[in-house]
Image (spheres, rainbow, N blue to C red):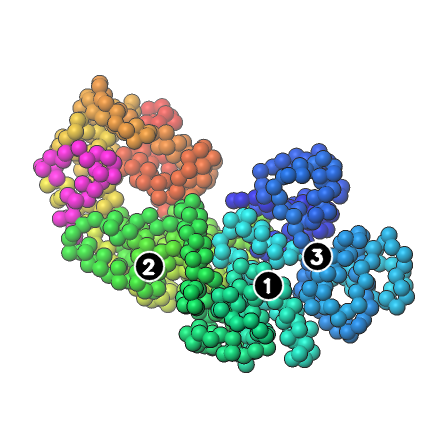
Amino acid sequence: MKKLLLVTGSKATAAVLTAQLDEHLAGKVEVQAIWIDGTAPEVLKKVLETDAVLLLSSAIAKAELVEAGLLAPDRACIVGKRTIDPDRLDALVGLAPGTKALFVNDRRETAEDCVESMRSLGLEGIDWLAWYPALPPPPPEYRIALVAGESSLVPSGIDRCIDIGARIFDFGTLSEIFHELGLPGSEIGLFSRRYLSKILNLAQRLARSDEESRKHARHLVSVIDSMKNGILVFDDKDRISVCNEEARALLSVRPGKVLGSSLASVVRNPEILEFLQCRCGEDEAEMQSQDNRILVRRFDLGDGRHTVATMRDITEVEAETARLNREYRRRGHVAKWTFADIRGESEGIRRAKRIAERLAKTDLSILIYGESGTGKELFASAIHAASSRANGPFLAVDLGALSDDLIESELFGYEEGAFTGAKKGGKAGLFELADGGTIFLDEIANISPKVQQRLLRVLQEKEIMRVGSAEIKRVDVRVIAATNEDLYALASRGQFREDLYFRLKMGFLRIPPLRERRSDIPSLIEYFLRMDSQEEVEIDPELLAVLAERPWHGNVRELRNTITYLLAVRDGSRIGLEELPDSGYFEANSIPADGGGSIDGQGAAGSGTAGSGITPQGGQLAGGGGAADPFDSLDRSIIAVIHELVSRGSTAGRGAIAEALAKRGFVCGAGTVRARLEKLAAMGFVSSSRGRSGTRVTDQGQIRFGLKKA
């Protein structure tokens, strides 16, 4: 998680600005605050040397740090600009035009800046006087004073003091912070929408006539003209109150008066006009305006009167989409497989692919049914990659690997202080991270009734609420769930919500088990050999015939593990019946104690004396007196991590394993961890179970990897 270091002049200012940043960055960025007053210079210097995006509360704060020799003048940083919080100005709405009022602060620059902020927000009808303690007493006609959290500075003789609280960062500063931290454009858009709503509400409270309303709208335009998007705001009578410069350019608006004009007189493109005038809720569409292809998004402001339209040039949108895709890939939130990765030509698998491809073209929630190891996540990934959400994130969640306590907080997130151990600033849930994309919920039958209720709300209302929060957040997420259990039977017994079952099953897909598609086994084996760069290895026809007749209770996953095992114990470039383990390997999914085809405690193959293996870098190791060790440093680290987690009473789930591996220098996702665990499980070195038990190293694994003596 990226870090943001906030430096302010005082502790009180730090508290206000931290709260503002947490409102927009909680769960996305770690915010640390420190203040100049009362902090030892050596402490300040040490903190300023940390590797974080540096945010200074003002130019004054920067000057103090530079003058004290604590900050290099050329150090990269964001110097914040501050403004008045529009939500704190209700007390000023009733002031009559021409009222004489002081704005009191401790410095001339700050007091004058505060007055300018009041005027830019449309409060220029007041006769403002910037005052600070170094000045003589103000003229006696000034009987009202405003302060930004510093009431002690107010001079004597004042009849009324209005405290509007400490100033907050302005829109431009927050936009700069968002861009510097590389946050998605959707986050900036959400902030813009909130900020715009605050400014419009203020303008409405200030307006006393249509003419005055248009005047305040002009002030509003000056505030939002710097926005990257085109902004157009109009009321229920189609009168325009806001049209910034970017909107004028994208809509090719002719020079002249726009504010107060009708929508039809300004927007000449009939297709765009029809889209804007549609009173049918939030929507988005691509439009052609003169020489520009633009993306137009329309939504109601929420006051029942105003509609807002945002516009962006499609080329900019495509560039932003490309950037987001790179960020999703960096975080591992991408679909790893497409329909081209689904192997097999049997009728069963071809039918499943046909249905999946059709469902991909819809936005229905989908329930995938299939036995363990049939490739449910593979199909979910392919559906996402072929859908209109392909440019959005794809998050896969194994609910069977999480305890019930963790499932709720992981899916929906939590607020700071929601429970013991909750992170400072809270944490965004997986549904928030998957906004605009797809979330895959494997082993959906495992969730509790409480989580079932919350999931139903997501599907019906597209809304989530973090644990410990009363704030409702809207999310646009497609849900694909998977199970190997009969959910309808569970619903009939009251163990699963029937309404949730039918909501998930709006789209349904059954993946056939391997025993129903035996004709695909040869092509699957060929594919696995290519994946392991072992195309030169030959499978004896007799062995292939035996493999084709196995029941394969573990399905494709079990077949994959078996091929991995056979490659590890083979002698030469040909695999025959002699390498096939006895039935105990398949039925118990463990290596028999008698060593028939197993790998013993010293790492030598139970059959043959010479062979080849795979180096940690994936290359060939020539044999010469014993099979090469098939385990690389990642395998050994996974075993060590599992043993450490279990030893201290923690659950060794995939997420916990991946996190612990990262601390050891291995950057790998849950898919990589799962593949390695399957390989180790096929050899009998680890065992996995659902819920709190997680994964454990077996006795045989502990002996094999030197964790205990034989």
497 relative position to 128: left or right: left
Quadrant in the picture for residue 481: bottom left
Residue 8, position as x, y percentages in the image: 70, 47
Between 248 and 332, which is closer to the camera in this rendering?
Answer: 248
The residue that mark 3 highlights is 167
Residue range highlighted in magenta: 516-544
Task: Verify whether residue 525 appears in magenta.
Answer: yes
Whether residue 225 is visible: yes
188 relative position to 286: left or right: right
Q: CA distance from mark 3 to mark 2?
A: 45 Å
Between 94 and 124, which is closer to the camera in this rendering?
Answer: 124
Marking on residue 249: none
Name the outermost residue toward the top. 625
Number of the front mark, 1 or 3:
1
Q: CA distance from mark 2 to mark 1?
A: 35 Å
Residue 565, position as x, y percentages in the image: 23, 34
Task: Verify whether residue 169 appears in magenta.
Answer: no
**Tag 2's secondary structure?**
loop
The mark that comes first in sequence, 3 or 2, is 3
Between 296 and 496, which is closer to the camera in this rendering?
Answer: 296
Q: Residue at x 20, y 22 (%)?
A: 610
Q: Residue at x 58, y 41 (%)?
A: 52
Q: Label 2 sits on what residue type?
A: Ser
The mark that comes first in sequence, 2 or 1, is 1
